[in-house]
Image (cartoon, grey):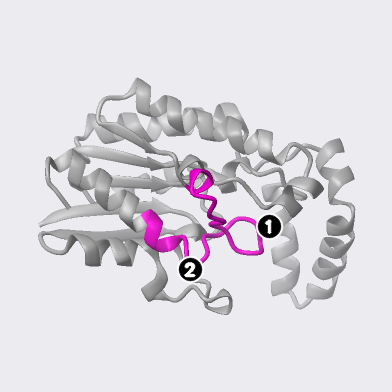
Amino acid sequence: MKLINLVGDSLSMVRPNEGIQGKNLYWMQLQERLGAPYYVVVHSRRRNDTTWVVQTIDEDILAFPAHILILHLGIVDGFPRLFSKREHAILDGLKTMGLGFITRFVTRIASRNRPFITRRFQKFYVKLPDFERNLHTILRTVQQHQLAQHVILLGILDTSEENARRTYRAVESIAAYDAVLRRMAVEYPNVHYIDLNGYFKARGITPILDDGHHLNPDAQPHVAALLEAEIRRLEGETA
């Protein structure tokens, strides 16, 4: 069995209210396309960022030595935020205490003022130098413990025009974080980068849902096909 370990954020998870069921997910389609002897396991979490991956590396990567490790991360780290991690945790805590009306009020006011807030208070879940440092930690750990023969990094997709208009330097921020992923594929042997942005732009395909971040149902098969082609190329196979 050739294990494929996918570590990601909500882009690789279901969104039933937006038409993303399990059967739609690109990694399930990848499993179907590859068949035996490949077996895909998934360690994805909502709001997952590289800092959290470093903290859970024992559970999600060290415990699952794989033939191929796929990392689908970056948008949680590098998209400009209205609230810091700590502030978000406080707002979530208010909801669990039955004070969700406060969370909704604060969120509504902040959302209305997103252009000003993101320009005046630049907040990221993971700052760019920390993002790069985290990736080095992950990749060095993988190499040190021989946890994968190959690592595939999926590029970060641009956000929607609406998000870009209302969020200060959103496009530039995404590009900066994506550039780090590209650089990792140059700096480390057996690390490979897939340019999702370039692929979809070249074909005039809109790959994201109205929320401006998550893959829509039409884009999922394309990502599966890109991954299959890359895996078969690395294996010296033909699709």
- Residue behind mark 1: 89
Q: Position of residue 188 (x, y in %)?
A: 31, 24
| Position of 69 relative to 95 (above/below) | above
Residue 1 within the segment the image draws in magenta = no
201 magenta-colored: yes
Residue 225: x and y in percent read 32, 55
Q: Is residue 3 left or right of residue 203?
A: left
Q: Which residues are magenta?
A: 200-223
Q: Is residue 102 visible?
A: yes
Identify the disc placed on residue 208. none
Image quadrant in which you'd find residue 173? top right
Q: Name which residue type carries label 1.
A: Ala
Q: Is residue 179 left or right of residue 56?
A: right
Q: Position of residue 154 (x, y in %)?
A: 42, 44
| Quadrant in which the N terminus is drawn | bottom left
Q: Is residue 94 left or right of residue 10?
A: right
- Name which residue type carries label 2: Pro
Where disc 1 sits, the SS reads: helix
Q: Could you say which disc has been placed on residue 217 in the image?
A: 2
Measured in 3D between alpha carbons, the distance from the residue under mark 2 to the one under mark 1, in whole angstroms, is: 30 Å
Image height check: is 147 above or below 59? above
Mark 2–mark 1 contact, CB under 8 Å?
no
Between residue 150 and residue 171, name the one nearer to us: 171
Residue that appears at 39% across and 57% down:
222
Q: Which mark lies nearer to you, 2 or 1?
A: 2
Query: On screen, 58 above or below 18?
Result: above
